Image (cartoon, rainbow, N blue to C red):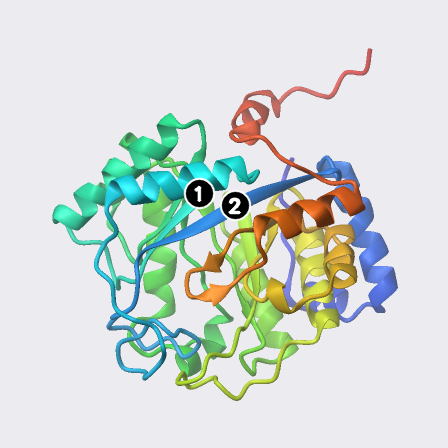
Amino acid sequence: MQQKNWTKQEILDLYNTPLLQLVQQASEVHKQYHNTAEVQVSSLISIKTGGCPEDCAYCPQAARYNTEVKVHKVMPTAEVLELAGNAQKGGASRVCLGAAWREVRDNRDFDNVLDMVRGINNMGMEVCCTLGMLTEEQAKKLANAGLYAYNHNIDTSEENYNKIISTRNYDDRLNTIHNARKAGLTVCSGGIIGMGESAEDRVGMLYTLSILRPVPESIPINALVAVEGTPLEDQPQVPIWDMIRMIATTRIVVPTTAVRLSAGRVGMSMEGQALCFLAGANSIFAGDKLLTTPNPEFNQDMEMFNILGLKPKAAFADKHHDHNHNHEKVTV
């Protein structure tokens, strides 16, 4: 399917559509492109926590902020594989490995990450990494180890970016995404709402993602979890209606992409999440921790899936789908 070229104004008009009308429209698009009964479940493992030199205003892992996060070095591979196995038992089809680095360096830590990627890939799960900025060479090494996806969020609009982060610029973000693509990796890239940005900023972020070619296979929409000690500690919780509106808009603008309900889900009611699924969210993060902020437990999520009639999606389902996407659907 050809990705439509949206203008910022068109996305803004869409975003401002009366809410129920917007959800209905998004739901129709969702039905057209996805199996609405399936939700892809990802689990995130923080393989190296804290001590990051960046100054992202939302992040408790920045060394310069005084938060409760303790600095840990890279976790042993065996421990990571054990956690991945637990996630798989809990229904996850993808494991995301997160390291609080500014960029990937070619050292023993990176070699360990490559081992983790190989190990999890051998378990029949999709592996995603979010390790900061990386070169094309490093991306190729990850791809050769069996990495499925690289996550690198653009966080917000280009205009708002320098209010949130000063230690790197927007182009650094886009270059990393570009490097992951050149290595043949799928891309996971989204952002955060609730950082004091305007509706125009939310739309600007979506616009940037929508003009990437190909568009990211996965777009996480995060609600800010305000952490004490960070510059954004006093931000009020994002209204669930903003989250639903953002997910519905994303679903319509990038119809083929997985839209992930990410951070902030622990503060949402089941009814709120049900509306997010109706509006086109078809991926979640599940498990104990989302890097350093709490996340609903697997069993709670499975209970919600049962109530809503949803089931976890199998790993690599889209890989098989990719081979067939050029053929028209034939009904027998």
Residue at 60% from the left image edge and 45% from the top image edge: 258
The residue that label 1 is drawn on is 95
Q: Are marks 2 and 1 in contact (CB under 8 Å)?
A: yes
- Binning the other alpha carbons within 10 Å of mark 2 as few (below 14), some (14 to 19) or many (20 upward) gives many
How many callouts does the rendering have?
A: 2
The residue sitting at 53% across, 31% down in the picture is 315
Q: Residue at x 63, y 39 (%)?
A: 2
Task: Give how far across and how far down residue 88 sits, in percent.
Answer: 49, 36
Q: Of 276 and 143, which appears nearest the observer?
A: 276
Q: Secondary structure at mark 1?
A: strand
The answer to whether any part of residue 303 appears in the image is yes
Quadrant position of residue 91: top right
Type of the residue with mark 2: Ser
- Of the residues shown, which amino acid type is indicated by label 1? Val
Q: Secondary structure at mark 2?
A: strand
Q: Residues within 10 Å of mark 1 (few under 14, many from 20)?
A: many
Residue ID for mark 2 = 42
- Residue 86: x and y in percent read 46, 40
Residue at mark 2 to residue at mark 1: CA–CA distance: 6 Å
Of 73 and 226, nearer the camera is: 73
- Quarter of the image with the N terminus is top right
Q: Quadrant of residue 262?
A: bottom right
Of 108 and 215, nearer the camera is: 108
Query: Percent position (x, y) of residue 33?
Result: 72, 37
Q: Is residue 314 left or right of residue 94?
A: right
Instruction: Specify which label sits upstream in the sequence, 2 or 1.
Output: 2
Res. 4 in view = no
Which residue is most to the left? 107
